[in-house]
Amino acid sequence: MFSARFLDAVEALRIGLVNFIESRDTIAEAVTDYARRVAGNAPLTVRAAKAAVEAWEAGERPEHLAKVRELVDACFNSADYREGRRAFAEKRKPVFRGG
């Protein structure tokens, strides 16, 4: 980014700048599927992941890191965590409720 050099899609994928490459005809469906996949994850976990990215962007200040730790602890102590473990053991898709 500092060089302002343009990357083609293949290179952007290779270095992790993008998650996938799609044609113009299939991009809307692919993005919708990806968003559904994210939305289907445990809400507390998605919240903690967002907080971790925000903490990193803010320079990993102690108060931000403490908040991330708090959110991660909440994930491990949640009903959704227990549901995820049960679903994995039972080889089924988990049903997360956000708690």
Image (cartoon, helix red, strand yellow):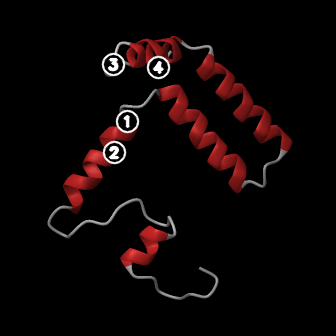
Which residue is disc 1 drawn over?
A: 39
Q: Is residue 25 left or right of residue 79?
A: left
Which one is in front in this view, the residue at disc 4 or the one at disc 3? 3
Q: CA distance from mark 1 to mark 3?
A: 20 Å
Q: Is residue 35 above or below residue 40?
A: below
x and y percentages locating residue 94 in the rendered image: 36, 20
Q: Provide the secondary structure element on which disc 2 rests.
A: helix
Q: Which mark is residue 35?
A: 2
Q: Earlier in the sequence, mark 4 or mark 3?
A: 3
Is residue 58 or residue 15 the one in the foreground?
A: 15
Q: Is residue 59 left or right of residue 44?
A: right
x and y percentages locating residue 76 in the rendered image: 62, 19
Whether tag 2 and tag 1 are in contact, CB under 8 A, the answer is yes
Whether tag 1 and tag 3 are in contact, CB under 8 A, the answer is no
Q: Earlier in the sequence, mark 1 or mark 3?
A: 1
Q: CA distance from mark 4 to mark 3?
A: 21 Å
Give the quarter of the image for residue 97.
Answer: top left
Q: CA distance from mark 1 to mark 4?
A: 11 Å
Which residue is disc 3 drawn over?
A: 91
Which residue is at a point 57% across and 42% down the rendered structure image?
50
Q: Earlier in the sequence, mark 4 or mark 2?
A: 2
Q: Earlier in the sequence, mark 2 or mark 3?
A: 2
Q: Is residue 40 above or below residue 54?
A: above
Which one is in front in this view, the residue at disc 1 or the one at disc 3? 3
x and y percentages locating residue 89 in the rendered image: 41, 14
Which residue is disc 4 drawn over?
A: 98
Q: Provide the secondary structure element on which disc 4 rests.
A: loop
